[in-house]
Amino acid sequence: MNRIVEARFLAPDIKLFRIEAPKIAEKRKAGQFIILRVHPDGERIPLTIADSNKKDGTITIIVQGVGKTTRQLNNLETGEYIQDLVGPLGKASDIENYGTAVSIGGGVGTAIAFPTAKALKEAGNHVISIIGGRTKELVLLEDEMRAVCDEVYPTTDDGSYGFHGFVTQKLQELINAGIKIDFVLAIGPIPMMAAVAEVTKPYGIKTVVSLNPIMVDGTGMCGGCRAIVDDKTVFVCVDGPEFDAHKVNFNILTKRNRMYLLQEKISNEHYCKLDKKIKEEEVAVL
């Protein structure tokens, strides 16, 4: 079992965990992920490693509670334990000195973009970060990004903070301003990543996206993360999770990502009802 050293909410339903995992902390690289189980009978879910500390032997993950297991995970607190986890898995980010690199994170995708932005800076790039959220409270890790990037531009859909608009609009603004961009990394919801690819393609800007939203078991055995890249079938969890954005078939990816929506909804509703019943019983006891 792995002890939770720190657990705190960054925004509604979005929680940061620092977890004891010394072997993973020692070996992990930007772009890789873990698989964990909350309890012995729980499902296995893949989560990207946002950061690590070799000295204290911890890894950091940031979790958005959207389904049954992520909600269960977000109910855990400092000092409690996760049943088990394994990693690091997946291929590490391809880090080079490109010149000017733009790291784009949408919502909780910023947690995945952060380690790669850090690695790009360490490789000698001038790193620009665009971090987006629907509202100000959903703009994550701004201070952490400012610590490792040369420029940081927060954006909000509703204009409550930073640039009023989408991350793609801010990216287009930078391009229109004549900034020579050599590399773009985009991580977030699939529609956002597809939109970034559309912005950069006419300019021939090398663009990479992380297809982690479609991963299921993380080992390549279930086949649930099949995607079409460069007209070839890939398994995102073992062949990626990062791919050339201009070669990804986002239409098929979107359809596959929606395959289990009904099952996820049923499972989540069942968990919410069970959680509500447990809380009502706890109140009755008090």
Image (spheres, rainbow, N blue to C red):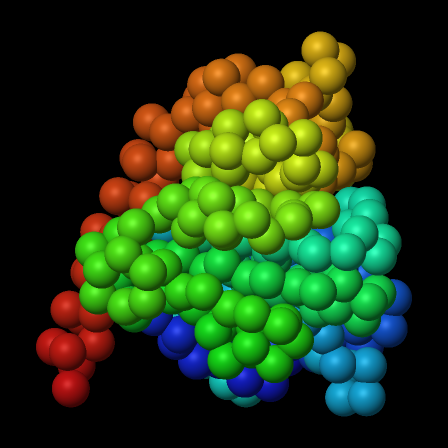
- Left or right of 175 on screen, residue 217: right
Residue 263 versus residue 187 in the image, above or below:
above
Give coordinates of residue 245: x percent, y percent: 64, 31
Q: Residue at x 67, y 37 (%)?
A: 205
Residue 267, quarter of picture: top left
Q: Is residue 105 left or right of residue 33?
A: left
Q: Is 143 left or right of 100, judged from the image as shown?
A: left
The quarter of the picture where the C terminus appears is: bottom left
Q: Nearer the viewer, residue 149 or 57?
A: 149
Residue in the picture at 38% in, 36% down? 264
Q: Position of residue 3 (x, y in %)?
A: 63, 79
* Vertical order, 166 against 221 (above or below): below
Q: Pick the residue in front: 285 or 230.
A: 230
x then y, percent, for residue 29: 81, 61
User: Is any atom of residue 89 visible in this view?
Assistant: no
- Which part of the image, by quadrant, shows the N terminus? bottom right
